[in-house]
Amino acid sequence: MHLYTFLSLLLIFGPLIFGLLVMLAPGWRYKTPVIVLSALTIMAGGILLALQGPFTLSIDSGLMKALPLIELLILAIIIYIGFAIKKMLIIGLGILQLAIGLISDMLPHSVQAHVPTLKVDLLAVIMVLIVSVIGPLIVMYAIGYMKRYEVHGPEQMRSTGLFFFFLIGFLGVMNGLVMSNDLKLLAIFWELTTLCSFMLIGHDKTEDAGESAYRALWINSLGGAALMLASFLSISASGSASLDELVAVGSLLPLALICLAAFTKSAQLPFQSWLLGAMVAPTPVSALLHSTTMVKAGVYLIIRLAPGLGGTRMGQVVAIAGAFTFALASAMAISQSNGKKVLAYSTIANLGLIIICAAIHTPLAYAAAILLTCFHAISKAMLFLCVGTIEQGIGSRDIEDMEGLMRKMPITTVIAIIGMVSMMMPPFGMLIGKWMALEAVIMSPLVLFLLIMGSALTVVFWSKWIGRIQTVAYHPVYKIEDVPFSMFATKGVLLLGIIAAAAVVVPLFKRVISPMAMAMFSETVVTSRSWDLMNSASAFIEWPLFFMLALVVPVLFLVVRGIKKSHIRQPFLCGENLEGAKTTFEFRTLMDKGESARIRSYYLNPLFGEAHLTAWANPIAIALIFIMFGVISK
Amino acid sequence: MIMIDPVITALLAIFAVPFIGAFLVGLDRKLTARMQSRIGPPLLQPIYDVIKLLHKEPIVVNRVQIIYAGLHLIFMVLCVVLLALGQDMLMALFILAFSTISLILGGMSVRSPYSRIGSQREIMQMLSYEPILILMLVGIYLINDSFMARDILASGKPLLLSLPLIFPAFLMVMAIKLQKSPFDFSTSHHGHQEIIKGITLEYSGPFLAILEITHWYEIFLLFFIITMFWATSIPVGLLIAAVCFFCEILLDNIMARLTWPWMLRFMWTVALGLAVTNVLWLYI
Amino acid sequence: MNCREKSPWIVHFNCNSCNGCDIEFLACLTPIYDVERFGIVHVGNPKHADILVVSGAVNHRNVRVLKNVYEQMPSPKAVVALGACGATGGIMADCYNVLGGVNQVIPVDVLVPGCPPRPEAIMDGILQAARLLNVHQKDRHAGAEVRLTLQPVSEPEKV
Ligand code: SF4
């Protein structure tokens, strides 16, 4: 067997088998080593694949004949779930998909040998690398998390073995999704991610969890139906369906349908509600959904289809929809005090940003989209892991309750702060991506305007949050938190990853991503303006940045070291400081009583409140989707 | 300035700029005093202040503060250096924003209600001026087809003629950045007792001096941008900058401070409206 | 150093004063007297200040506040006590709650006499204190700085 075949089998089916093993392993004593081993294997497989480089693989037609059967089985499961939870919507969507699938199977099939079933190009390699390096880290984090969760979580929740089966299996499904070129195969993996997320979100079996899982299922089934329809249209037009062909033919209706599917999966407005609901699940699930799997599937598809979208009217509408999501999701994040919800909105916003870049389709935008996908995955994974730890530590995910976290959980707090800083500040990759995105969209005024407003808004909620958790009291007593090794180590690895990524971002861009974008565009005609932008971005002089940082770090270190204990004074409270106060917000009032000042952050609810912003944003987003379909006929 | 070896330019920017900034601050104080029929401090007063502060005891509430003060300065210097080297303006503006964010985080890192309030107000200020600054750059790009500062300086026609509406919008941003009434919410040059200097409250001694020096760089930066609006002839550009400077000080002395919701509304309607209108006609 | 004399920043604390001294002190800031021409800035908080200007007599309630404010100033720092009250307690000296002059609690550098003192005298006092800052800086380097302990001197008698 060739190495390619082996690696793709390992990465797609390996996780499912590993998951099964973990499920069957009795007790934590056996589970833990199995989980760690399988995570490491997946990781090794992903890295090997990346070293191996791009390849394509054709599966012989005999095996492909089995696909409709598998599809049928999955749809039957979805319809069964619909009956089990008594939701007509699910049953309806399931039957709709079944019908489309059956009709398209009936159509005459011409299997073309030159179209590969699996196509692992550079983009797919990057995605596989993201999935199978960050994903296993999250799985390992889940060891420590679930041990505690079993004790503190709701009583009626599903078994932890099942949880790990879906968690690890998800990675395989996602690997399959990014590798497959055949639309049928893609649709199967697509449905499988939906099913996995349904099971994981509903893990707690509380009323909330059930509701959220149901919502995730129906919204994503809607996207699945759109994807099936796209594949049906493509088959009926040319006899076979693959992503390559779709891009090459460039007929817009299937593309629009796939964009719709991507919007549902990437939780773009108006489909954002399922991702917001998904935060009821245990935190490793959120981390997985938000960073490496699930939502990334949507943007991956759009980046993949970008050559077909570029320069069309529809592409512009997709970009506007993405920009709208970016601005509005950032605005809504300001009004949230629930930490996980802020992260969720930030994910939605960043996915919107990636969609803009993909749909604009200039070399610079393409490069930006890939950079953002990578850096978002790693930063968001780490942030979710931190919030999970914090939540278990203080029993709340409210940002206001995280006041003075630095004292209670110093290590987690520092990691979280670096994670948040990496979402917005130099020298981290997100900023570079945003910068390139801004320069890339310069010729589309509406997108640009929304992007500018959105990026001003993102800064607000991140700095509010950082400000809240980092406060250190006067003469603080740090209590090093007690966190299981797995939770601690995975965050450490991710932290190192972020720092390493920041250090290599410029060379990475110049060596890998920029040539990749250039190669992508070597045949297509690109305006000289967008080439100019690409060249100027590639010529960006980074040495002052690094020189300054290299200079400053030791100086700051020396200055900080030079501060003696006697130099540390209480903060100014008009002189009414309470002696021996632990938190220095305490001051003396009338009758020498001690009282504590409490400063809440600004949430700007009248302006950015979630409810009333959603009320008018969703109709506009729905209208944008209709416009997306409408411009096709023009 | 741009022709010289980049290292020399960078060093020049790092060491000469603060003195220009200090001079402008001194002039500001002097002019303000004259407008209030006072004699006012000597022109070099800002430099005296900073030297004095540098020699004071370095007291802090916690050590994290210091790191943020350092980042505040460094990002600002970096921004000035990038501009002096004729680099990408958009990146420079981002870095300017991070300088401000560092200041905000520094203010928030201490558990002091006053500096907390000051920081939050500073966030609101940033929210209100950031889009306008970027829109200004977009306008400049549409005229020159480049984000590079060196191309903008080398372009043949004055920007002011093509950006007549963005210019006043930028002046409003400048009023915020210079901490001038009616926009001096987070901290102010004059209202020393109001929310007790807000965001800078918990910085003292050398660290306050760092903030002050950063402010000098910032002032120079703003003047650089104003002069850029008439880059074809430097004397005219400087004259425009001088007139604007005077107007800002006048405004500062005749206006009362309003509330931050007012500022947010004002900037997002009037100033943003001006900028968007201007950019729109450049697109068409 | 010269710069220290040229930029004394002051913080004003009202200890139990009758407001006479405060009014005269604030008069210094007006255009007629214009202290800013000496580089004097009235900052609102001790963290930025060099000179603490205290008006009025110290009592049991505000002694802690006075000490805190003094303690939160970075050295070198100087203290100017305004008026008869600042010096000895003045007409308030015999009140049941009054401890006495400012120098009962913190080291005072300059006493400005009067009830209330004239703005010219106050300005003169501040500038003299500014000159003393140099002496304090030398003391600081020699390690001979005055440091306070932050305990209340005595509990008020129960009446
Ligand atoms: S010295 Fe005279 S004016 Fe000053 S506080 Fe005492 S009584 Fe009032």
Image: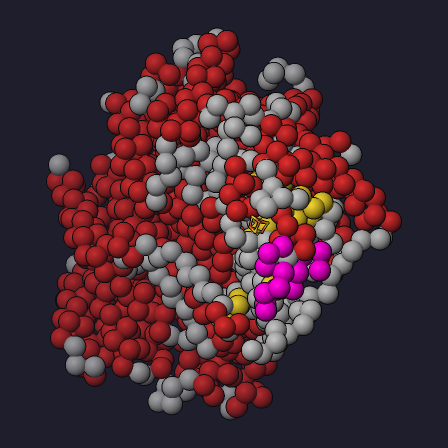
Which quadrant holds the C terminus of chain C? bottom right
Q: Which residues are magenta?
A: C90-104
Q: Please report the residue visible at 72 percent of the width from the left and 34 percent of the height from the top.
A: C5
Q: Is residue C144 visible?
A: yes
Q: Nearer the viewer, residue B147 or B123?
A: B123
Residue A55 image point, x, y percent: 48, 51
A295 relative to A586 in the view: left or right: left
Residue A168 image point, x, y percent: 46, 73
On screen, B82 above or below A109? above
Q: Quadrant of residue A470?
A: bottom right
Q: Quadrant of residue A462?
A: bottom left
Residue C102 is covered by the magenta coloring:
yes
Residue A524 image point, x, y percent: 36, 31
Q: Please report the residue visible at 68 percent of the width from the left and 39 percent of the height from the top.
A: C125
A614 relative to C55 in the view: left or right: left
Q: Quadrant of residue A94?
A: bottom left
Q: Nearer the viewer, residue C97 or A224?
A: C97
On screen, C38 above or below A11? above
